[in-house]
Image: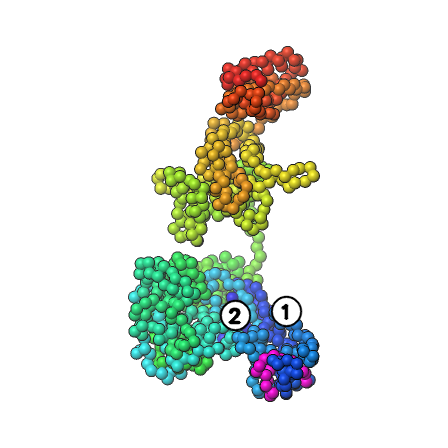
Amino acid sequence: MLLSLRWLQEFVEVAIPVQELAHRLTMSGFEIEGIDEIGPQWDTIVVAEVRESLPHPNADKLTINTVHTGEQTLQIVCGAPNVRSGQKVALALTGTVFPSGLVIKRSKIRGQISEGMLCSADELSIGEPDGGILILDNTLTPGTLLADALDLRDTVLDVGLTPNRSDCQSVIGMAREVAAMLDQPLLIPTQTLPENGPAIAGKIEIDIQAPEACPRYCAGYADNITIEASPLWMRQRLENCGIRSINNIVDITNYVLLEWGQPLHAFDYESLRASKIIVRQAENAESFTTLDNVTHTLPSDALMICDAEQPRALAGIMGGLDSSINAGTTTVLLESAYFNPASIAATGKALGIKTEASQLFEKGIDPSGTLSALKRAAALIVQLKAGSLATGLIDHYPAPLPSRPAIDVCISTVNKKLGLALDADVITRHLTQLYMHVTPTGPDNLEITPPPHRYDVSAQVDIIEEIARMNGYDTIPVTYPLVSLASAVPNLARDVSLKARNLLVNAGFSEVINYSFQDPELLAALRFSSDDDRSKPVQLLNPLSASQSVMRTTILGSLLQNLQHNLHASRCASLNIFEISNVFLKTAFGTIDEKRRMAGLAYGTCNTATWALSNRSVDIFDIKGCVETLLRGLNFDSCRFESGSDEPYLTPQTGIRVFIGDTYCGVCGILHPDIAENFDADSPVHVFELDFNQICTYFSEKRTYKPFSRFPAVQRDLALIIDQSVTAAEVSTTIASFKNKLLKQWNIFDMYQGKSITTGKKSIAYRLTFQSNERTLTDNEVNKVHDKLLRYLREQLGVELR
């Protein structure tokens, strides 16, 4: 929130330096994120008097002007058409630097010396462009700094408010806090309205049909309206606080919003049918076009401000397109109302609209300030000579909201929580300064009633926080908690997760963390069938957005979104990422089964091309090798792989099922190219997803170590011809089942299909390693085991020796 110090000082006396004020506000819970001095940017711009204005001899549209600054006379070349002798103007002296970067220097323009620049309101950022220079009051003294002449100096504090302090989102709200902090009175003048028009009762009729959503509705009427620019002081205050000036009537509503924290709305009265305001809830699928020219289909509980025929505003959020103030407006109906926070929040969220007004109503405003803010706006209309007020204001408040409930506070609890020794008198003084009503109910108890503007105070802990703020956080003594030392509780899932993370990072992967909320379109993109549990996600009742409306049933969708984002943001050539997180599946009993999954994605190249390495694309063996390295690193020496996964998101014939022993625990393979294209990938995407719960079930910390043999190993090659339908995994599994203590290791080193191999057959060559722990093997011993193995493979698989 941007807070004008000059504006603040209209309601509370601030006699301390601004830096000290900022410090004390920070120590009271309001972080000051910046201090901006308004005025120094105009310290080289002065009031000057035009003594003479003559045509430029070498340019039809330029003039040569002799101006006096009180100390010196300068010649200025100017192109504005409204320069005249005798005028008081704003002169930028040489050395002036404008926000646009323009630097004023002594220069020649068409052969004539120019020693400065006459400024327009637009160039000074204090008005709209009109093609001419700014003409000042003729009573001003030449040489006076422009910031002093126009009273433009101010200090603006950028106050960081916490979400619960909506009561401070206004000048008066901050003035209440500063007055309490400095122990100064709050100066809010009594407002008197110069009403001289007809009675308002005959001008407008108010009908509230949804009193729970709109308990209070106030209205004022003004005619003889003249739509024009607001005076400089109002425009400057609005712009200093971050609001663009529009016209006098709209500016008045924004001014009161900033001053009182009460959103107002101004209707063009002539556009209201039958001079009637009806506050009702929207009809089913009713449409409405807001001020920004967007047509919305409204939820049935949306609160509407209507006339006798049609909606005119989305209550508390935004006005309608055809009832807004325009250049032809001559009569105005001012609205100041209190709307139920839950109603405004639900409508704004359903429509995806968030405005300054809706954010205030959502957090809760002071219902007692509704009429006061309307009076302030009405008084400003008269003060700015923008129109004439009707006699009286309408305040429709049939059932006043109850007072805030009282809160019981124990003094000893306050002191125990804060580490202080405050008595009842000190606590009462602090809370009374914050407009809370304090009633003693016992020697150690107080009953506290918060004021209507403090929605954030509802329990004893809130009162304790207010006491701490007012007494000063720096008065709370520093204490150190006693820490009991205990051994860490074993956590298998945490330990396995840490080991898995380290293994994947060592394999060149980066960990990502995504939301568990997901876009349902991601599940459709992965092509899960209708009878697949993963296609039936858990719906969120109150989602943050449509793109986060379901709980994810697989991690792969999130990883693909990460890939797409990186491809767009950095045009990455490769990406290896993984995530270990939960997925949420519906059960047949209507409950939610939360399961942990581990998934990864590899895309692009394996390495950057160097003198020693060529640039190679990731392939199916890389992702399989990554999974195998992961599982073997987790002590699963029994992990195995089988081709033939039927996952719909994988390219046919590339899916590989992953097993730990005989237990299925996941899949890896190549993403279907159509799916990859939907995520803007122009080369194959390799993925894996494993059941982390299964991994934890079979995980064991135990490893069995055997001593190395001191005797040399013997290697023999075995080239086999087998049916093409037999996989290499089957051959390796069969060799493992041979169970001969001299056969230590076997690895595939060649696969071949070609002219010398019978159709329907293939050749696989293994390198076998034989070794004994007791002696050096002879050729005869190795030959016997080698021949037995070959006979065994013939019996089991029908292989032939190549």
Above or below, comparing residue 535 to residue 471 in the picture: above
**Which of label 2 and label 1 is nearer to you?**
1
State the residue at coordinates (59%, 20%). Answer: 719
Return the residue at label 1.
101
Is residue 76 on the magenta stretch? Answer: yes
Q: Is residue 417 visible?
A: yes
Question: In which quadrant is the C terminus drawn?
Answer: top right
Quarter of the figure with residue 329: bottom left
Quarter of the figure with residue 536: top left
Determine whether label 2 and label 1 are within 8 Å by CB.
no
- Distance of mark 2 from mark 1, alpha carbons? 23 Å
In the rendered image, residue 280, in percent from the top left (x then y), is placed at 32, 65
Above or below, comparing residue 65 to residue 428 in the picture: below
Nearest the camera: 332 or 19? 332
State the residue at coordinates (35%, 73%). Answer: 271
Return the residue at label 2.
241
Amino acid type, callout 1: Gly
Label 2 crowd bin: few (<14), some (14–19), many (20+), radius 10 Å: some
Secondary structure under tag 2 reads: loop
For the record, the magenta segment spans 73-90
Quarter of the figure with residue 732: top right
Q: Earlier in the sequence, mark 2 or mark 1?
A: 1
Above or below, comparing residue 549 to residue 645 in the picture: below
Nearest the camera: 528 or 451? 528
- Residue 231: which disc? none
In the rendered image, residue 705, in percent from the top left (x then y), is placed at 60, 26
